[in-house]
Image (cartoon, helix red, strand yellow):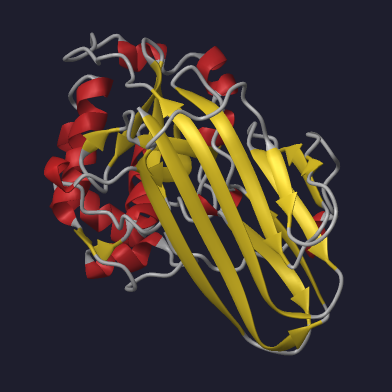
């Protein structure tokens, strides 16, 4: 499936600010399952753009707007050719649980086995597990268990934008039983890790199809979960829509939780408030996209387009501060 993606992020400031420093995780990954055909990043005001690869293998772009401005618009455009993952077996043998306890696996997946950020066990999560018989699910083989957990989360929560924020702990969604994709992903990740199943947060896009029963917002970014099973390696599960991540899911970045891979985050200099508007469009490509693969950063204003070079050092960590962006 060949998909075109447009992701517009606009920050508006009540009064002009003196400077802003930003970084974004918007470039779709290149993998066996998806081929990045093209990627463009436009900035307004124009700015020099750099890129690097973070510790999880994600492409990160960062830039500095050093002059006064009252708004900042980031427009990402991508074309991706995606493929359906291999068909999963009906189940795995019970010995898979023993294979998951190996020291080699625990070393390889260390970051995705321990609590981090929003993915932490709480009393509210304990009550949810008890009330919904989640521990009974664990008695199945690992594949059947994670698929049943995916469905249990889908059945237990209603999708509703605006009731949680980007920095909401999982207790919020557990108490209200309403939330969005990142909330459901955090709940599932936390439970999987408590079982000893490596689980990671995936940020990206979904080509929404109401015929498939999708309930996620077609005009927003999307998030789901990948779990590691020794016999199958990483498999994607989408608890928001009770489905296996397939060719309609486009991966941009992976991390331990949302805080590792927000679509954008940054800081600005100035005493004012800011508003954030986000618009996402994912559609089937109407025509063939040029080959070979390329990554180009376009700048508005005079002067030639500059090709991005990867692995340029990022600005200092202490200057980074997340601007909330709900998925």
Q: Nearer the viewer, residue 121 or 84?
A: 84
- Horizontal arrangement in the rendering, residue 180 relative to residue 136 (left or right): right
> For the image shown, how many numbered marks are present on the structure?
0
Q: Residue at x 23, y 57 (%)?
A: 127
Q: Residue at x 50, y 54 (%)?
A: 7
**Which of the two residues, 71 or 162, is positioned nearer the viewer here?**
71
Instruction: Tell me which residue sits at (16%, 15%) in the image.
Output: 90
Residue 189 is situated, as x and y percent measured from the top left of the image, at 39, 42
Q: Residue at x 59, y 41 (%)?
A: 27
Would you identify the image quadrant in which residue 162 lies? bottom left
For residue 89, above or below residue 182: above
Q: Can residue 138 be spotted in the picture? A: no
Where residue 326 sits: x, y (%)?
Answer: 45, 64
Q: Compared with residue 194, is residue 157 higher up or lower down, i.e. above or below?
A: below
Q: Is residue 159 left or right of residue 133?
A: right
Viewer-side residue, 275 vs 132: 275
Quarter holding the C terminus? bottom left
Q: Is residue 16 above or below residue 47?
A: below
- 179 vs 122, nearest the viewer: 179
| Residue 139 screen position, x and y as percent | 18, 26
Residue 326 showing in the rendered view: yes
> To which quarter of the image does residue 64 belong?
bottom right
The quarter of the rendered structure image containing the N terminus is top left
Give residue 150's position: percent from left, percent from top: 23, 39
């Amino acid at each position: 499936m060949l998909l075109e993606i447009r992701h517009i992020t606009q920050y508006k400031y009540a009064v002009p600010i003196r400077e802003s420093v930003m970084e974004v995780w918007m470039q779709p990954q290149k993998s066996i399952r998806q081929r990045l055909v093209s990627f463009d990043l436009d900035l307004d005001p124009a700015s020099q753009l750099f890129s690097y690869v973070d510790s999880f293998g994600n492409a990160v772009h960062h830039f500095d707007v050093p002059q006064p401005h009252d708004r900042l618009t980031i427009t990402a455009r991508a074309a991706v050719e995606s493929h359906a993952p291999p068909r999963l077996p009906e189940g795995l043998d019970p010995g898979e649980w023993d294979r998951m306890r190996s020291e080699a696996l625990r070393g390889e997946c260390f970051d995705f086995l321990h609590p981090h950020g929003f993915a932490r066990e709480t009393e509210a999560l304990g009550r949810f597990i008890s009330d919904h018989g989640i521990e009974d699910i664990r008695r199945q083989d690992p594949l059947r268990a994670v698929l049943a957990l995916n469905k249990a989360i889908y059945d237990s929560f209603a999708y509703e934008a605006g009731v949680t924020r980007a920095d909401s702990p999982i207790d919020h969604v557990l108490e209200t039983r309403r939330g969005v994709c990142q909330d459901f992903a955090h709940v599932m990740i936390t439970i999987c890790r408590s079982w000893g199943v490596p689980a990671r947060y995936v940020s990206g896009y979904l080509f929404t199809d109401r015929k498939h029963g999708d309930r996620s917002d077609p005009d927003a970014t999307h998030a789901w979960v990948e779990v590691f099973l020794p016999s199958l390696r990483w498999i994607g599960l989408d608890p928001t829509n009770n489905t296996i991540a397939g060719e309609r899911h486009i991966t941009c970045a992976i991390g331990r939780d949302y805080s590792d891979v927000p679509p954008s985050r940054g800081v600005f200099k100035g005493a004012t408030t800011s508003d954030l508007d986000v618009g996402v469009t994912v559609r089937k490509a109407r025509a063939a996209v040029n080959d070979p693969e390329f990554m180009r950063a376009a700048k508005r204003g005079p002067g030639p387009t500059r090709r991005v070079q990867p692995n340029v050092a990022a600005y200092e960590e202490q200057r980074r501060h997340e601007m909330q962006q709900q998925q």
